[in-house]
Amino acid sequence: MSAAATDTLAGKEMAGPAYRVVQRVVLPLDGDTDVLPLYVDFNSARRVVEHTKRAIRRGAPKTPEHLPESTHQRSDFIVGRWSLRLPAFRRISLGTYFNAFPASYWRKHTEVRSVRLTVEVDAEATVIVYRSSPRGVANRVDSAHVLKGQASFDLPVTAFVDGGWYWFDLVAHVDNVTLVGASWAVEESKQLQRGSLSVAVTTFNRPDYALRHISTLADDAGVMEVLDRLIIVDQGTDKVRLQEGYADAAAQLGEKFLLVEQANIGGSGGFARGMHETLEAGDSTYVLLLDDDVSIETEGILRAVNFADFTTKPTIVGGHMFNLYERSVLHTFGEQVDQRRFFWGPAANTKEGHDFAASNLRTSPWMHRRVDVDYNGWWMCMIPTSIVREVGLSLPVFIKWDDAEYGLRAQQHGYRTVTLPGAAVWHMPWTEKDDTIDWQAYYHQRNRWVATLSHSSQPKGGRMPFESFAIDVRHLLSMQYSAVEVRLKALEDVLSGPDHLHRTIGERLPWIRATRATFSDAQIKPDRSAFPEVRPPSIRKEVEEPVVVAESLLRAGLGALRQFRAVDPEARAHPQAEVPAMDARWWRLTGLDSALVSSSDGSGSSWYKRDRKQFVSMLLRTMALHRSLLLRWNTLSADYHEALPRFTGREAWAETFTAATVPGEEPKVL
């Protein structure tokens, strides 16, 4: 154990080399036991063994026989943002998502080769330091018996190439002990410049969240030290500046606040505006993109800046997303784009929807392996301004694929994206809605094609065109004609070439909404009595999901043939079934002529009606459009790839911003 540091928790210079605190032990102050497992671990279990493939073949279970149950969460232990009070003879671990040190990420992406842990207590205690291997095996590496004061540990990070974390446990002796504070610091060279950032938030009719962002950032002194400005791009009709309390909130940031009002050109338009304003100001090292509907752990912003400052070359640093409604549940640990089918998904060797309340960091072996990603979601993503100047602004696609495409584009320029553990926000989940069949269906389709044509390494996009066609067929079999109609328009726009992107960015959404309103499957009514009574067919059997590909293909083929049969006249007047949103799958709906289907958000229901002419017409159209796209693939791909620097450039975006500016609502510092 090294000598105690003279001043560690404030991030000032220590005796000897200069050190910078890059991560502080942080605690929640709201007493919310849902989030407490992310900060403090009260569980005595330290390890869960996941069996190898060989052990599974020999009869071992695929999952551990028993996951340890978390002990009672004690929010009363928390006495401050940086401190907690531990009763005598108790032990807790800081081997948690927010307080363990992700050593492997520092090992790979920086030149840092050691980290200094400093722990300060006010009474007799034992500090035990652990590290983990990439397999999640915990190893005790050092300990200190402290009567009162600080204990410092200089810990190497050289052996963390493939993964692993550092953390410490705190044990109280005969008296209660207060953890006054703890920090992780790294040696800082005199040549290293401290970065600063602008935070760009795009909002659409969520002014309460926007005001909360202002107060959240203003209340954190550490964030204020690195913040150049908060840029809120307001694209809604419920204006942020007209809200009660706006003036007081804006005054907290003063000249560090910039409000931009423009017409709605989507999330990509809002974030591109944030990038543009940051470059125009010219004083920020980074621009941090944040969704409006998130709750922020501000310590994560500081960690992202500190980490990015030390990376060996400019690096995009993103944060994780937790579920705003299930606050201990992590959406995904990292994301990649599958080039074979050109679609996003969780990174290899990770799991989705992980609940830290059920299995903490120390008992989740897969989480100790370092995860490399292709991109980070723009719920929280910090991009060096040097990369923005070279790579360009966001893809002008309104919503969907802007974050994934940007990560791929930066990758092609030689820049990495790192999803940094310990930096995160809580975001409204999209698990309770299906945006592939609502107005966003157009953007799912169009933007995936644009990204594929611009970046795919596979001949003719690999499996992507087949999947695109199969999705259309699935929607047709499900009587979701509104989704197919807007998806067909998306293909027509793709075929028209890249010039349509900026031209239609502010126009396409009104067309989508007007078009969908003409289809009964898109007309959601909140009152069940607005529909006729259900009259099921005389012969009806429960339909089970196909379990193998061959069965799926057979069922799809039979379902397609059934579409050519006449619609039961009774089904035109009365729905044949009432189907919950979670059960509205193609293999269930394809056997019906009409059905009442509830919306995935639970707000109402719509009446799906089979239309033989509609099915045939749309099927022929999607076949023709997909055929044209494949025949013209090489030309279109070259066009989009060549035009990419132009339509993501500042000049093209500046013209779009001018067109989207509402008279009298130019950018203003308030």
Image (spheres, rainbow, N blue to C red):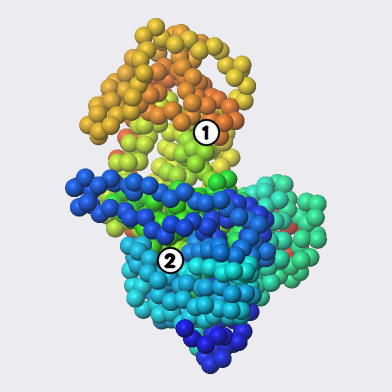
Question: Which is nearer the N-term, disc 1 or disc 2?
Answer: 2
Residue toward you, 221 or 600: 221
How many other residues sit within 10 Å of disc 1, few (<14), some (14-19) or many (≥20)?
some
**Residue ID at (67%, 59%):** 29
Residue toward you, 306 or 357: 357
Residue toward you, 313 or 580: 580
For the image, the number of numbered tags is: 2
**Which disc, if any, is residue 624?**
none
Mark 1 in CB contact with mark 2 (< 8 angstroms): no
Q: What element carries label 2?
A: strand
**Residue ID at (46%, 17%):** 577
Q: Mark 2 is on which residue type?
A: Thr
In the rendered structure, the answer to whether residue 107 lies left or right of residue 552 reads right
Residue toward you, 460 or 533: 533
Please name the residue that numbered disc 1 is placed on: 600
How many other residues sit within 10 Å of disc 2, few (<14), some (14-19) or many (≥20)?
many
**Residue ID at (52%, 59%):** 41
Q: Inspect this view and state whether residue 387 appears.
A: no
Q: Mark 1 is on which residue type?
A: Ser
Whole-percent x, y for residue 189 in the image:
50, 88
64 over 604 or under it: above or below = below
Q: Is mark 1 on a helix, strand or loop?
A: loop
Whole-percent x, y for residue 474 in the image:
36, 31
Q: In which quarter of the image is the C terminus?
A: bottom right
In the figure, residue 445 lies in which quadrant? top left
Whole-percent x, y for residue 431 in the image:
49, 41
Please name the residue that numbered disc 2 is placed on: 417
324 over 225 or under it: above or below = above
Distance of label 1 from label 2 (alpha carbons): 33 Å
**Residue ID at (40%, 71%):** 140
Q: Which residue lies furthest to the bottom in this view?
A: 16
In the rendered structure, the answer to whether residue 451 lies left or right of residue 628 reads right
